[in-house]
Amino acid sequence: MSTQTILDQEISFDDEGFMTDHTQWSPELAAELAKANGLEELTDRHFLVIDFMRKTFIETGSGPTIRRLTKQSGVPTKELYALFPGAPAKKAALIAGIKKPVGCI
């Protein structure tokens, strides 16, 4: 576990880089986390996915799988990979300030 100061706030992360306290998240923090993960700018489409990830996490205690994300968020798989290159569910969860979704490698 590690701690970083981001936007004058102490944020704790687990060994894989996921925030340990999702209540510390804010859209401004998301922008900083996005930059740290290779995304220069977050658009409304990014926030559609991020908000869906956070809502699912708050309701179920886990982020959605990539399958659920594509079926229920309204963002198709191809676009998810364009928005969050590499591993969309994992990268979106990092930026959304939630734990790694079950089933992510």
Image (tube, rainbow, N blue to C red):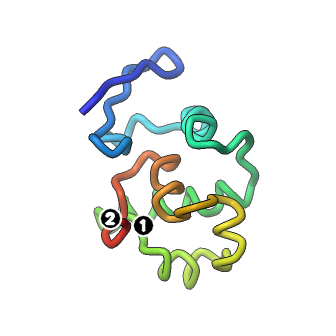
Q: Amino acid at mark 1?
A: Thr
Residue 90, position in %: x, y?
A: 46, 59
Relative to residue 91, is residue 75 drawn left or right? right
- Residue that badge 1 annotates: 56
- Residue that badge 2 annotates: 62
Question: Above or below — where is 21 with respect to 9?
Answer: below
In this rendering, the label closer to the viewer, 1 or 2: 2
Question: Above or below — where is 85 with respect to 78?
Answer: above
Residue 99, position in %: x, y?
A: 34, 53
Query: What residue is drawn where x is 70% and y is 76%?
Result: 78
Tell me the element at label 2: loop
Residue 56, position in %: x, y?
A: 42, 66
Question: Above or below — where is 69 with respect to 56?
Answer: below
Query: What residue is drawn where x is 31% and y is 69%?
Result: 102
The residues tagged by marks 1 and 2 sit, at their Cα atoms, a distance apart of 7 Å
Relative to residue 13, is residue 91 drawn left or right? right
Query: What residue is drawn where x is 57% and y is 42%?
Result: 37
Relative to residue 64, is residue 86 drawn left or right? right
- In front: 92, or 49? 92
Residue 65 found in image quarter: bottom left
Residue 68, position in %: x, y?
A: 48, 80
N-term-proximal mark, 1 vs 2: 1
Farthest-out residue, left: 1
Residue 16 found in image quarter: top left
For the residues labelled 1 and 2, say whether their Cβ atoms are less than 8 Å apart: yes
Residue 105 found in image quarter: bottom left
Residue 6 marker = none
Q: Amino acid at mark 2?
A: Ser
- In front: 26, or 96? 96
